Amino acid sequence: MTEGVVEKRFHIFGSACHLLIGSGTTDSTYLLDMAQAELARLEARYSSFRPGSIVQEINAAAGNDSYIPLDPESRSLFTYVTALWDQSNHLFDPTCRVLVDCHDSQGGVRVTADQLQQAIKLVDWSKLEIGPRGARLAARGMAINLDNCIRPYAVDSVRKILLRNGVTNALIEMDQDAACIGRQPDGANWLVGLRYPKGPRTVVTRLKFNDRGFAMRGNFEQRVNIAGENFGRALSPVDAQPIPGLLSVAVIAANCLTACSAASIARLKTEQAGIRWLEKLGLPWIAIDRELKCLGPLAPA
């Protein structure tokens, strides 16, 4: 345990989660329980694989006339995803979930050409209809997966709860997403570890992000090699082929959701377009390109 903090570790959204709060905070153990309860609430409501979640109900009702009711929080989340879809020129598309099953672990296509084309026809975020009655997917067989958006939203939600309760030192980490409050109780920086290639080895660099949010999308260690070229796991919603973009992108921003948005869009563009996007945003970032080189202002010297 880090000195001066109380902490809790558990799994949620299919990911390891780590919560730390300065031990000088009143009722810190109670606040950890409150934070875990908030994450459990969001998992139950929005996890793509949780029975009874809003997302699962929308997927199960795809192609029929049933609308799944949306409360204000859910409508706000869908509005955010739509904005991300627009800003990415429709490359960020949560309906790509159906394409994942069309590929094997090495990135190769494991279905027939006709089956792949049928799956591509089911990819189109604009076919998620949202109206006064709620949300529905227009075609049978369509499915959405919002977990990559819900996790950073959940991290930020916990951070807001802790701030409202007077917490001045905290860290929330879940998979590739994190946020913190202030510094560590002893004044040290909050750090997040990030693996990167260095020659034939993989090493770790640590990034400080006091009072900020962090998100990484993509994983260069899970790259696939096709015809001698490296590709990440992101698939194009247009042709279901691997996108020739950055293998990993990590961003630090004012909150976790903003960092997620920047990293997600950059990873779905071609390499040079992704770099230009990140440079235009002006946020601290690090990326691993297809030649396993580190780029960006946070890249190790």
Image (spheres, rainbow, N blue to C red):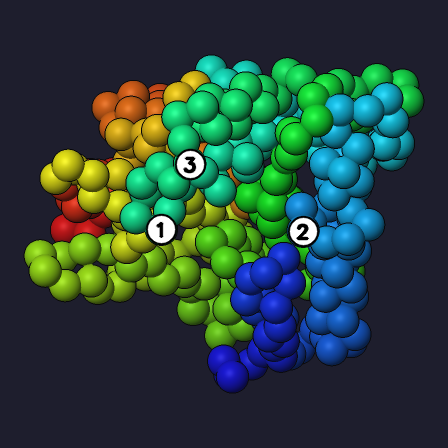
Q: Tell which of 274 and 285 is nearer to you.
A: 274
Can residue 221 be spotted in the picture?
yes
Can residue 156 be spotted in the picture?
no
Q: Tell which of 193 and 185 is nearer to you.
A: 193
CA gap, disc 3 to disc 2? 23 Å
- Point 62% across, 72% down: residue: 10
Q: Position of residue 179 (x, y in %)?
A: 55, 54
How many C-alpha atoms fall within 10 Å of the one at disc 3: few (<14), some, or many (≥20)?
A: some
What amino acid is found at the position of numbered circle 3 in the picture? Answer: Val
Task: Reply above or below: 87 against 59.
Answer: above
Quadrant of the image occupied by residue 195:
bottom left
SS of the residue at dot 1? Answer: loop
**Left or right for 45, reference 245:** right
Dot 1 or dot 2: first in sequence order is 2
Q: Tell which of 149 and 143 is nearer to you.
A: 143
According to the picture, the residue beneath numbered tag 3 turns out to be 111
CA gap, disc 1 to disc 2? 20 Å
According to the picture, the residue beneath numbered tag 2 turns out to be 49
Q: Tell which of 63 and 236 is nearer to you.
A: 63
What amino acid is found at the position of numbered circle 2 in the picture? Answer: Phe
Dot 3 or dot 2: first in sequence order is 2
What amino acid is found at the position of numbered circle 1 in the picture? Answer: Ser
- Point 49% across, 42% down: residue: 101
SS of the residue at dot 2? Answer: loop
How many C-alpha atoms fall within 10 Å of the one at disc 1: few (<14), some, or many (≥20)?
A: few
Which of the two discs, 3 and 2, sits closer to the camera?
A: 3
Q: Position of residue 3 (x, y in %)?
A: 51, 83
According to the picture, the residue beneath numbered tag 1 turns out to be 105
Quadrant of the image occupied by residue 50:
bottom right
Dot 1 or dot 3: first in sequence order is 1
